[in-house]
Image: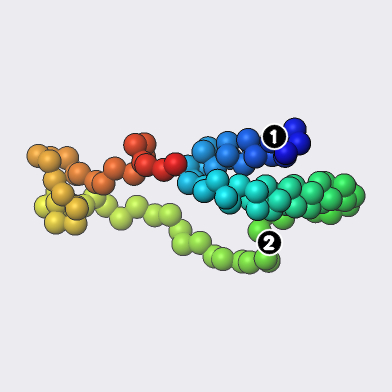
Amino acid sequence: MSDHDAKVRIDVEKVARLARLAVDPEDVGPLSKDLESILEHAQGLASLDLDRIEPLAHAADLNSPLAADETSGELAHEELERNAPAMDGRFIEVPKVLGGGGGA
């Protein structure tokens, strides 16, 4: 295995760790080749002359009208409690969504 192959292997394992993905050792080689192919394609795109191309906010020309952002009054505390997943005294309990997640 050359130094270049070892570096690619380390990079793939690092990317997998940062993305919290479990990667089997036998998959590192094929993933390295896929990653190299993606990076080569991106380098090809970077060499294109895009000076006269207007940037887009979206890939498709969509015109989605938005509803007006208007207040409609406060919810009664009883109605809020009825719709809450769980209550802890006067506080609403919601499932934890950040931090502590497993992964590779």
Amino acid type at circle 1 is Lys
Task: Please identify the quadrant where the C terminus is shown.
Answer: top left
Q: Quadrant of residue 91?
A: top left
Callout 2 secondary element: loop
Picture coordinates of residue 34 (x, y %)? 69, 53
Q: Quadrant of residue 93?
A: top left
Q: Is residue 19 visible?
A: yes
Give 78 or 54, whichever is nearer the viewer.
54
Frontmost of labels 2 and 1 is 1
Task: Please identify the quadrant where the N terminus is shown.
Answer: top right
Picture coordinates of residue 86 (x, y %)? 16, 49
Residue hosting label 2: 59
Above or below: residue 4 compared with residue 30: above
Above or below: residue 89 compared with residue 80: above
Q: Quadrant of residue 9?
A: top right
On screen, residue 103 versus residue 49, left or right, reads: left
Spatial separation of the CA atoms under disc 2 and disc 1: 35 Å
Residue hosting label 1: 7
Amino acid type at circle 2 is Ala
Picture coordinates of residue 85 (x, y %)? 19, 53
Name the residue at 14% across, 56% down. 82
Name the residue at 51% across, 61% down. 66
Callout 1 secondary element: helix
